[in-house]
Amino acid sequence: MKLLLAEDDPVLADGLMQALQETGYTLENVQNGSDALHLLLHFSYDAAILDLGLPGLDGLEILKQLRDQRNRTPVLILTARDTLQDRIAGLNLGADDYMAKPFNLLELEARLRALLRRAHFAHAQEIQFQGFRFDTEGRRLFKGTQPIELSARELDLLELLVVQRGRVVSKAKFVESLCGWEEEMTLNAIEVYISRLRKKLEPLGLQFRTIKGIGYLLEAENA
């Protein structure tokens, strides 16, 4: 699981990074609100831990812009602002949980696990996009009513692109998500599977972009 930690207190950030990495998470830390918003809008994270009092851009404004752009990355607010009004404002803007500083690390870890579980089960069993239908439970892709034959690896790559459509999925994210396979995944292998997907799906009208040096993007459909 890859998390973004937006926290400008270096001592607190270092402590959280170490504690959460020891429990198996991969983390990136930013100390500026503008940087946090940029990363959340353009890259894929399983969740974000967001301080409200960030320099550059306030945490509530980050949250508002994320949700205005239909970015559903789960967000846990972690802040010194502990009034009822602050909590209501954060939750109304789309935060998934809210914790005030000082906090208990074990409680933070438990709330983070619960947030990630809720996000996992909230995924629709069927995702429709650009004339296609992806059955996440049955692991099948359809164009209208016609099933499209894809390998298990191709389905895994496609699912990441579909779930994160509108955002760039890095090659490293593909490798991280698929590392449970007995066969070791490499960046070159990702490129091979992407090429196979293109050969099968572009003639049917589905296209995704290569973002040079970063990864791949399936465009979100206009509302």
Image: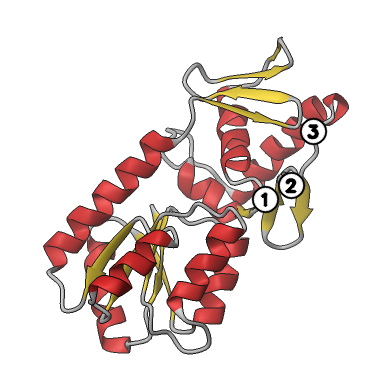
- Asked if the residues shown at circle 2 and circle 1 are in contact, with their CB atoms under 8 angstroms apart, the answer is yes
Which residue is labeled 1 in the image? 166
**Quadrant occupied by the C terminus:** top right
> Residue 85, how many percent across, how many down?
30, 73
Vertical placement of residue 58 versus 166, above or below: below
Q: Which residue is mark 2?
A: 219
Which mark lies nearer to you, 3 or 1? 1
- Label 1 SS: loop
Given the image, on which type of amino acid does mark 3 rest?
A: Leu
Among numbered discs 2 and 1, the one appearing first in the sequence: 1
Report whether residue 72 is seen. yes
Counting other residues with Cα less than 10 Å from the Cα at mark 3, is it few (<14), some (14-19), or many (20 or more)? Answer: some
Kind of residue at badge 1: Gly
- At label 2, counting other C-alpha atoms closer than 10 Å, the crowd grade (few under 14, some 14-19, many 20 or more) is some
Q: Residue at x 49, y 84 (%)?
A: 32
Label 3 and label 1: CA atoms lie apart by: 14 Å
Asked which quadrant contains residue 20, the reply is bottom left
Label 2 with label 3: CB-CB less than 8 Å: no
Mark closest to the chain's N terminus, 3 or 1: 1
Q: Quadrant of residue 144?
A: top right
Residue 206 numbered mark, or none: 3
Q: Is residue 115 left or right of residue 213?
A: left
In this rendered view, identify the residue nearer to me: 90 or 150: 90
Please state which amino acid type lies under the numbered disc 2: Glu
Q: Position of residue 7 (x, y in %)?
A: 37, 79
The answer to whether residue 100 is above or below residue 25 is below
Q: What kind of element bears circle 2?
A: loop
